[in-house]
Amino acid sequence: MCQDGIMHALLERRSIRRFTPDPVGPEILGALLEAARWAPSGLNNQPWRFVTVEKREKLDELAGFTKYNKILISSTAAIAVFIDTEKIYHREKDIQSIGAAIQNILLAAHGMGVGSCWLGEILNRGPEVGKALGAKENHELMAVIALGFPFEEELRGPRKRVPLKDLLIGSF
Ligand SMILES: Cc1cc2nc3c(=O)[nH]c(=O)nc-3n(C[C@H](O)[C@H](O)[C@H](O)COP(=O)(O)O)c2cc1C
């Protein structure tokens, strides 16, 4: 197992908000969905559902639903992640599972040199996004992941994290 590789990837990954015009393409999108599908989920419930977006007009339409519109306008693909509300067995656990699937997508994308940004603010317009993407009543939006090849400058600059000493609230 390449433990170092995974650690390296998760320390190196960062949100990318500006992308080059090069298309991500269906092959990479397929690989990202495959990564998502193998995430852990409570009871192996796999409550996630996906819509992929590559069409320029659709990406621009999605941009209209978030104040972070520039990210989607710059992106060349996106994956909308939904929860199937008819499949829910425990809302918190199912949503945690979806977070794991999303993280798998971000890390897999990073491993392929593809930049990503997890968009949550767009949930304020979740039902409208669902409608625009042809989702059914039982599909509730959890996130949109903007994708594309990163602009060089996006790979620089500091990344901030709370120091571990402030996070570790117990040690026995
Ligand atoms: C649940 C969630 C929602 C997020 N929503 C947005 C968003 O709407 N717009 C945005 O630009 N970034 C969004 N982000 C990205 C965070 O801002 C980013 O992950 C955080 O600042 C840490 O930076 P890093 O991803 O580069 O490590 C979101 C991240 C998460 C996990």
Image (cartoon, helix red, strand yellow):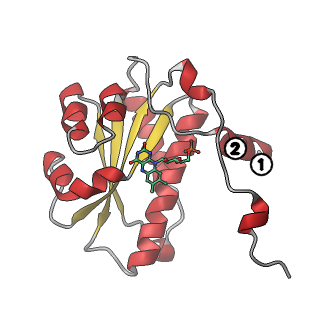
- Where is residue 44 drawn, in percent x and y? 48, 71
- Residue type at numbered disc 2: Leu
Q: Residue furthest right?
A: 172
- Where is residue 106 drawn, in percent x and y? 52, 44
- Where is residue 34 drawn, in percent x and y? 47, 47
Residue annotated with mark 1:
3
What residue is at 64 percent from the left and 40 percent from the top? 159
* Secondary structure found at label 2: helix
Query: Which quadrant of the view contains residue 20?
Result: top left
Task: Name the one closer to the observer, 64 or 141.
Answer: 64
Which mark is first along the chain, 1 or 2?
Answer: 1
What residue is at 45 percent from the left and 41 percent from the top? 117
Left or right: 118 with respect to 12?
Answer: left
Residue 156, can we see it? yes
Quarter containing the C terminus? bottom right
* Inter-mark Cα distance, 2 to 1: 12 Å
Left or right: 87 with respect to 93?
Answer: left
- Residue type at numbered disc 1: Gln
The disc label shown at residue 26, or none? none
Residue 45, can we see it? no
Residue annotated with mark 2:
11
- Where is residue 132 drawn, in percent x and y? 15, 46
Left or right: 39 with respect to 120?
Answer: right
* Secondary structure found at label 1: helix
66 to 23, vertically: above or below: below
What residue is at 32 percent from the left and 64 percent from the top? 83
